[in-house]
Amino acid sequence: MKRSFRSELDLTSLVKILGVCGFGTGAVVGAVTLLAMVLLHANESGMEELVGALLMPLTGFFYGVLNALIGYPFYRWWCARRHGQRVQGLFVEVEPPGSGGPNKADP
C-alpha cells in the first residue's frame, strides 16, 4: 500500500541518496558517451573519451556527495519551514524505537 509521510533526512542519509543518484547518472551518461564514441568514431584512438566515460560514475558520485554537503543547510532550513519533506511510497520500518533489532515487514 502506498503511503505518505513527512520526513527530514539527516546529513548521512542525504549524502547516501545523492551519492547513489550521482553514481547512477554518471553511469548512464558514461554509457551514452561510450555508445556515441563507438557509433560516431569520434577520434582515432578514443582513449580520452574512454577514460572519461569510465570515470563518469565516480565523478557523478563525487558531485552528488558535494551537492549534499553544500546543500544540507538549505535543506534543513526548508524542511524546518515546511515541517518536513512530504514523501510517498512503500515504507518498511527497519528498526522501531526501543526494540533494539530489525523489524520484519508485514506480508
Image: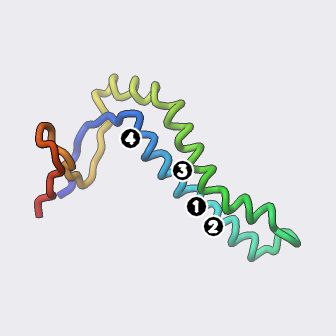
Element assignment for label 4: helix
Q: CA distance from mark 1 to mark 3?
A: 9 Å
Element assignment for label 1: helix
**Left or right of 79 in this view: 27:** right
In the picture, the disc for residue 22 is 3
Which circle's residue, 1 or 4, is located before the other in the chain?
4
Q: CA distance from mark 3 to mark 4?
A: 14 Å
The amino acid type found where label 1 is placed reads Ala
Answer above or below: position of 59 versus 43.
Answer: above
Which circle's residue, 2 or 3, is located before the other in the chain?
3
The amino acid type found where label 3 is placed reads Gly
Contact (Cβ within 8 Å) of mark 3 with mark 4: no
Say which residue label 1 marks. Answer: 27
Q: CA distance from mark 2 to mark 1?
A: 6 Å
Residue at the image position 70 percent from the left and 69 percent from the top: 34
Say which residue label 2 marks. Answer: 31
